[in-house]
Amino acid sequence: MFQKTDFWIGLAVGAVAGIFGYRFMQEREQRMAAMQQSMLPAGQVPLAELQRQKEELEDMIAAQEAAQAE
């Protein structure tokens, strides 16, 4: 089992994927914590975040409309 190169390649690929996945989750948690700290009082969302979400929703709506038009 340990003499097969497929095993070692799979082990290396799995380890690299695990490291990148762990780093991604850590960065995401840090961004979420920073966003929660920067939230305005009384649960208000910053205007820049609302505009970003609006643009994202408009893009999704346009994609849905284009898909239905076909």
Image (cartoon, rainbow, N blue to C red):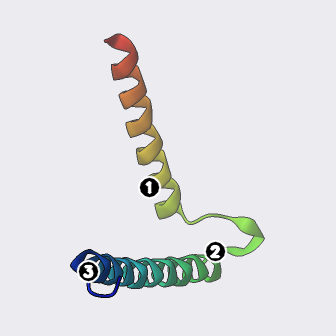
Amino acid on which disc 2 is placed: Met
Cα separation, mark 1 vs mark 2, equals 15 Å
Q: Residue at x 62, y 64 (%)?
A: 45
46 vs 61, nearest the viewer: 61
Label 3 sits on residue: 4
- Disc on the earlier residue, 1 or 3: 3
Task: Please name the residue that numbered disc 2 is placed on.
Answer: 39
In front of the other: label 3 or label 2? 3
- Horizontal side of 29 relative to 42 (left or right) equals left
What x and y, as percent, mark residue 16? Answer: 33, 82
Q: Earlier in the sequence, mark 1 or mark 2?
A: 2
The residue pinned by badge 1 equals 52
Residue at x 52%, y 55% (from the top left corner): 50
Q: Are marks 1 and 2 in contact (CB under 8 Å)?
A: no
| Helix, strand or loop at mark 1 | helix
Label 2 Cα crowd, 10 Å radius (few <14 / some 14-19 / many 20+): few
* Separation of residues labelled 3 and 2 (CA atoms): 53 Å
- Give the residue displayed 40% in from the left and 21% down from the top: 65
Residue 7: x and y, percent? 31, 78
Q: Nearer the viewer, residue 47 or 61?
A: 61
